[in-house]
Amino acid sequence: MADPAAHPTREAPRPGSRPRPTFREAAGSSAFFAGLAVSTVVFALLAPLTAPLPYRARYRFITRWSRFNLWWLGVACGLRFVVEGAGNLPREPAVVLCRHESMWETLALQTLFAPQTWLLKRSLLRIPFFGWGLALLRPIAIDRGAGTEAMRALVRKGARCLDDGAWVVVFPEGTRLAPGEFRPFHRGGAFLAKRTGRAIVPIAHNSGDFWRRRRFIKRPGTIRLAIGPAIDTRDASPSEVNRRAEAWIHERVASIRSQASA
């Protein structure tokens, strides 16, 4: 992770604004996607060879794909990040609730919580190349329409991952959202934390100001990611845990964007 002061950066755009991309931004975004595509194919072809290895060895190898693409994003697009609140991380693995605005956080979180697994839709495992490597990292893949059975699967698989020393990452709003857009938190992550007695770690960031969902252009600058104080779940209901995490994330996201646009 580079020192942002050593590189020229752009002020974060205001939510909803879409300045016309420059030639440099278009060329950099094209170069980034070329590197992303090639690295995805290469790692997808090599990942099956790691299947006989222990989980942590597989994880270290396959997640080098994420680290490479974060590095390449900085080189090609001038988009880097800083982390605030690292001292808030608990000593043992916990359930991470993170705001979801782009693909960026799925890459960056792997540099902060290792090893980790994710709550995700089972259909993602069927994506060629990408899904093959993902399947080897023991994700908590569920069918969202399965209702109670999906929740049981989340608790069963999530508890096993936590006991094995892996962090569980959940995007509680369920999908990528545009800056300024919010949805009520799903209860799955809070329910898993409560049932296992693990803490919740809330994460806020402004990645959507630079890397928008369904947008080709990646704008240069510095994404700010903030790690919140761990939330103790032992004496609170899943609904109360969710309320506290949601309030902190919303407030912190607003603060990050307010400071960036000041």
Image (spheres, rainbow, N blue to C red):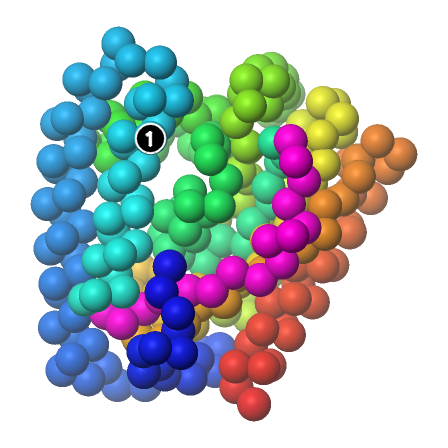
Q: Residue 159: x and y, percent?
A: 62, 19
Where does the magenta region start and end?
Answer: 77-92
Pointer 1 local density, CA inside 10 Å: few below 14, some 14–19, many at least 20: few
The stretch drawn in magenta includes residue 81: yes
Q: Quadrant of residue 216?
A: bottom left
Q: Residue 251: x and y, percent?
A: 69, 67
Element assignment for label 1 = helix
Question: Which residue position is annotated with label 1?
Answer: 60
The structure residue drawn at horizontal position 46% and vertical position 31%, both measured from the top left corner, is: 115
Q: Amino acid at mark 1?
A: Arg
Say if 22 sits above or below 30 in the image.
below
The structure residue drawn at horizontal position 25% and vertical position 51%, both measured from the top left corner, is: 69
| Front-most of residues 51 and 215 | 51
Image quarter hosting the N terminus: bottom left
Q: Quadrant of residue 27?
A: bottom left
- In the displayed structure, does residue 212 sit left or right of residue 15? left
| Front-most of residues 23 and 180 | 23
Q: Furthest-right residue in view?
A: 235
- In the displayed structure, does residue 231 sit left or right of residue 14? right
The structure residue drawn at horizontal position 21% and vertical position 65%, both measured from the top left corner, is: 75
The structure residue drawn at horizontal position 52% and vertical position 86%, both measured from the top left corner, is: 261
